[in-house]
Amino acid sequence: MEIRKIEDKCIKCMLCVKDCIAGVIRNIDGEAQIVQPDLCNLCSHCVAVCPKGAIYHDGLDAKDLREIRKELISSESYKEIAITRRSIRNYKDKPVPKEIIEDIIDVARYSPTASNLQDVGYTIVTDKHLLKKVSNWIFGLGNWVYSLIQTKPGKTFKWALEQAEATKSAAKYFDGMDYYKQQSELGKDYILHNAPVLILIHSPSGMEFASDNCNISAANITNYAHSLGLGTCYIGFLTLALRYDPILKWWLDIPKDRQVYSSLVMGYPAYSHAFTVSRKKAFVKWI
């Protein structure tokens, strides 16, 4: 890997030194010098911060490097995207074009990852039969657990779930299961919501900060999709099931050495929301 300073372009601003957290570029006697290129984690900050393009780095894809269009960045636009994005559970029976999905993933790949490992992967499912199969499987598991809690030991188990802080929010769904089953028989999809696209975001198993990396990417996907007129919804039950169910991992072709940390469905919303929603005040402690 070659990293070098283009001397006739350098204005000695030292921004490359200040922004190189790895210590590849250092201040040596008032000059920015490439000292230890083997420490580089390809974060691209040196080329991004240099106002004169005075850093050459052959480990980076030149096609990704362009000037920032600051005129397109608006705090009000981002705020509106963030506070109007909803979890969509009703979708039009309309496919999302492949090029739009590819554009969304192309934006997601710019999401930060710990140590810039860039090890987040994406599995995109648009096969209607597979989506229905996965949804029915998970709903069936929920129905099986529901039948178990009708027994005397099962009722004790349900009571225990309701008492535990970590599980009481999920346990409440059992109270409406009879209704959910009726609606499911009429075609209601309570798992994947009949969405045309499923995005599984995964990372190598056992990696530090893998969950953080995947969920940062997921947040960027949901917000960018919203800006394109698409709806998304996190499917926590699927993420949980993929943690323990090898059948689902096999169906969805998730590599054995990777774990899914975030599952999203995506499609065109069946209807729009005219107003923002109510949210609790943030819990904040100032120190």
Image (cartoon, rainbow, N blue to C red):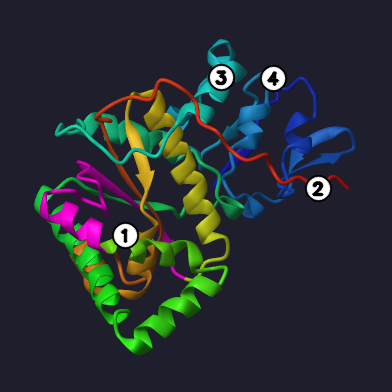
**Which residue, given by chain and number where applicable, does mark 2 sit on?**
285
Label 3 amino acid? Ile
Q: CA distance from mark 1 to mark 4?
A: 71 Å
SS state under label 4: loop
**Which residue, given by chain and number where applicable, does mark 1 sit on?**
176
**Which residue, given by chain and number where applicable, does mark 3 sit on?**
68
Image: 90 above or below 22:
above
**Which residue, given by chain and number where applicable, does mark 4 sit on?**
8
Q: Is residue 68 magenta?
A: no
In front of the other: label 2 or label 1? Answer: 1
Disc 3 or 1, which lies upstream in sequence?
A: 3
Q: CA distance from mark 4 to mark 3?
A: 23 Å
SS state under label 3: loop
Which residues lie in the magenta part? 178-205
Disc 2 or 1, which lies upstream in sequence?
A: 1
Question: Residue 165 at what x, y percent from top left?
Answer: 57, 68
SS state under label 1: helix
Label 2 amino acid? Lys
Q: Is residue 186 magenta?
A: yes
Disc 3 or 2, which lies upstream in sequence?
A: 3
In front of the other: label 3 or label 1? Answer: 1
In front of the other: label 4 or label 2? Answer: 2
